[in-house]
Image (cartoon, grey):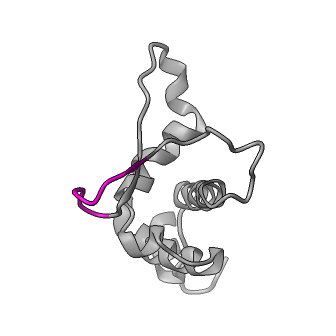
Amino acid sequence: MIRGLEHLSFEDRLRELGLFSLEKRRLQGDLIAAFQYLNGAYRKSGEGLFIRECSDRTRGNGFKLKEGRFRLDFRKKFFTVRVMRYWNRLPREAVDAPSLEVFKARVDGALGNLV
């Protein structure tokens, strides 16, 4: 325990230390993995994992992911479905990042406002 933070709640301690909650850290890892898939880091295993909708008419980023329709309820927890909603909300500068390190920095900034 860090001195001076004993009386604060868990969320307040995280905020004081400038850390993300476990939910945001999981989401950050998922978004990083999605960025790598979409930029070709996993050529064979990631083929067809996501479907991109390239459009200049959309707000936010220009590379939205297309959401599939499922009849079964348990597919809502799959990686592609979990990531898609948050990926489509990311700002254009995060999605168009030239490298993984730049993407990580921009996602950190965007996650504070996203969730």
**Quick one: quadrant of the N terminus?**
bottom right
Counting labels gives 0
How far across and how far down the image is residue 70, in percent? 45, 19
Q: Residue furthest bottom?
A: 4
How far across and how far down the image is residue 38, in percent? 59, 55
Determine if the magenta segment contains residue 59.
yes
Q: Magenta stretch mostly in which secondary structure?
A: loop
**Residue at image point 35% right, 63% down:** 61
Vertical side of 55 occupied by 8: above or below: below
**Quick one: quadrant of the C terminus?**
bottom left
Vertical side of 51 occupied by 109: above or below: below
**Residue at image point 44% right, 55% down:** 87
**Extent of the magenta region:** 53-60
Q: Is residue 9 visible?
A: no
Vertical side of 47 occupied by 60: above or below: below
How far across and how far down the image is residue 52, in percent? 46, 47
Vertical side of 31 occupied by 51: above or below: above
**Residue at image point 54% right, 24% down:** 75
Tell me: 93 left or right of 82.
left
The residue nearer to you, when weighing 11 against 115, is: 115
How far across and how far down the image is residue 51, in percent? 50, 41
Q: Is residue 15 visible?
A: yes
**Residue at image point 66% right, 60% down:** 36
